Amino acid sequence: MIRLSHRARDVKPSPTLEVSALAKQMTKAGIEVINFGVGEPDFNTPEIIKAAAKKAIDDNFTRYTPSAGIPELKQAIVNKFKRDNGLDYKPENILVSPGAKASLINVLMAVCDPRDEVIIPSPYWVSYTSQVWLCDAHPVFIETSAENSFKITAEQLEKTLMDLSNPKVLILNSPNNPTGAVYTREELAAIGEVCLKNEILILSDEIYERLVYDGAQHISIASLSEELKEITIVVNGVSKAFAMTGWRLGYMAGAKHIIQKAAEIQSHTTSCVNSITQKACIVALEEEDGSVERMRQEFSRRREFMVEGLSAIEGVKCLKPEGAFYIMADVSSYLTENSLGINTSQELCKYLLQNYRVALVAGIAFGVEGYVRFSYANSVDNIRKGIELFAAGLQSLRQ
Amino acid sequence: MLISPASRMAGVQKSIIRQIFEAAQGKAINLGLGEIQFDTPLIIRELAAKVAGTENCRYTLNAGTLELRRQIAAYYEQKVNVEGICVTCGAAEALHSCFTSYVNPGDEVMIADPTFLAYEASIRINGGTVVRYRLDPEHDFALDREDFRSKISSKTKIVMICNPSNPLSKCLSIEELEFMAEECRKHGSLIISDEIYRELTYIERQPSMLDIYDDTIIVSGISKSHCMTGWRIGWAASSNADYIKTIVVAHQYQSTCAPYISQRAAELAMSEKGLATISEIKSQLVANRDFIISYFQKNLPELEYLKPDAAPYLFINVKGCDKEFSRKAAAEGVIVIPGSAFGPGSTGWIRISYALNRELLSRALTILVKLLTQVSQLRFEL
């Protein structure tokens, strides 16, 4: 057996895999599992988008495209940034990739040298750290907590930077997975100022942009000033907003010299994005049929329902998230003292799945102990049933 | 303020083929593309349209749908199992994931001179050092065994093989494959065998490297065999499933999974019914090959070219400056790729593809013959 590269040895498959593999096994064996682990909307892709895909297939639009994306789609993305974020880009500032994850790694590859440091607020989306390792760079975490609504502050960032030798990138994710936190304009401005002073590239992952609630407003940090726009790469995609996870399309915008390097990398790593998907996405971005708003409202309804259900369980605490479709529930009070010796979020998730048929993701997967993550990309019926089972599971620990 | 790019980007450029592709918008006839410019078979398009309209296009397993991996395993006659396959966004991603998984900065990766140009860039992006082994232009680009032996060492992490070869459209012989396998065995090197053109061979189909060497990862896909470049389906496969485990992880953090609709279409493409569509594509390619060769024989009998074992390229000796020739051809409205793009060993040659419709091909040939004649006259006068 030929040895792996050091980066491949460092990178582990997602820690959520054990539980999700078990959940799959159970489902296959005919056991009904209520799955709160899902990271994708449970809706169908809107009809007008599907129709555009069918047309592309019928028109034989099935060949290689320019690696950075077809011109009409890049223009649609330019229009989207102008319309939704007040950002002025040219097509040369845009790179279309097979998923927002691919956008992220293309940028990291393009800017990170070995041992460069990438700052990641914690809890964080599982893939960031692995992607940083794969680029031979080092992740550095800034802890957040429920007390500060799971958001980093400019002071924290400044303090962290003082200890670093090669800081290069800050990954900012608002609305946030897994906490649902949404940064305000003022918070972003303060963070942006620190990044400008320290010449840090901001990688702003805005994939959950369309899913904000209770009047919360999504602000792109790039839109705050020309200077910030220059040092920010805005990453977005169609997966979450349009229920298009399986189509694989992400996009980003930023300074031309970085986007070009990322495009060069992409021309060698995945060549181009699926041609049919690109055509479908023009319609997704340009034609509004109201389905995104309908999905958002449904998510909002489920969120209310879930927050209410979870808050009613003794010893469980959660914030009402302002965005995305996840809730981080604090279950630490159950992990300290229980008869079964369950002390970690990972053990708890395994126990709840095996005995109460509820699939959750352990907080430790996002870098924080004492929490479990619920996704409310599930029906209200399932949410009701699932929370009952979850509550019963927790109760059983105290008996 | 300018955030600086990573040093791994030094010397990495957008691939020349891509540059030409993007420059070729407009009227130029493109013989430069590594793409069979025919339609995707109708049954595959019909299924895909149905899937797009009726199915829920969600994430699939990172490694690809089980059904697709079953079909691929069957294609390799069960020499790989479903655990030994990772479906990716095109063979390009499979290749990149292999390098990410196995190349440490400073490791040597051997690639042929000449060979497909994306290898070098992807190896460099992953910090590897490229060492080229020579294919001998004086002997129809056969493997130069002495040279190979002198280049391989304990530092050689990977030997990259492209078989049938892009740009040569030539197959390595079983003896050549066995020789390389033996050398790799001695030095503990992994072989990555890019077999994307395997289904388009004119001669008797060669064994896959899987049959010859255990420490092999196959990179392949349906882009060429089924005219499905835009769909982005490729894979990495190995009879040793452990080699694929890490590639699945690298792929997971690169692109999550290949597109759902494309995977469903690929399930059909790799089934018996889908594989049968290749013969129609091949017969069109054979007809084009015969057309182009008889055209050259008639109009330019002294032209030297490599007899193709596979589609879709003809490798032509222009006996001079291949870059200059390519630039001239582009100015005259035909895109060809200079041989030096594939390595210094094929300087003086050009690669043309004949996988496009007959009328365009015919127009391009008129221009090329005119240019080639000029070039040979010019030399004569000199």
Image: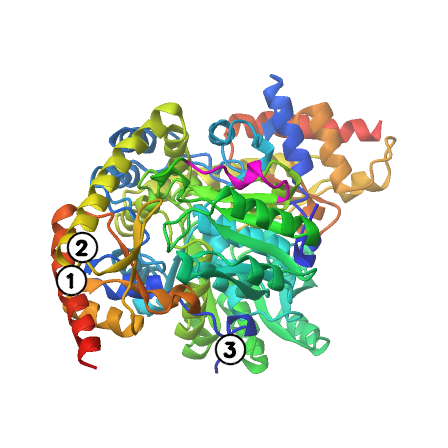
Q: Quadrant of the C terminus of chain A?
A: top right
Location of residue B168 (image quadrant): bottom left
Do callouts 2 and 3 mark residues in contact (Cβ within 8 Å)? no
Q: Label 3 crowding class (10 Å Cα cut-off): few <14, some 14-19, many 20+?
A: some
The residue at the far top in this view is A30
| Secondary structure at numbered mark 3 | loop
Residue to which mark 2 is pinned: B296
Q: CA distance from mark 2 to mark 3?
A: 52 Å
Q: Position of residue B265 (x, y in %)?
A: 36, 33
Instruction: Using the image, determine if residue B241 lies above or below residue A197.
Output: above
Examine the rendering and report whether any part of residue B255 can be seen: no
Do callouts 1 and 2 mark residues in contact (Cβ within 8 Å)? yes
Q: Amino acid at mark 1?
A: Val
Which residue occupies 53% across, 74% down? Answer: A192
Left or right: B217 in relation to B29: right
Q: Position of residue A45 (x, y in %)?
A: 36, 37
Q: Earlier in the sequence, mark 3 or mark 1?
A: 3
| Secondary structure at numbered mark 2 | helix
Do callouts 3 and 1 mark residues in contact (Cβ within 8 Å)? no
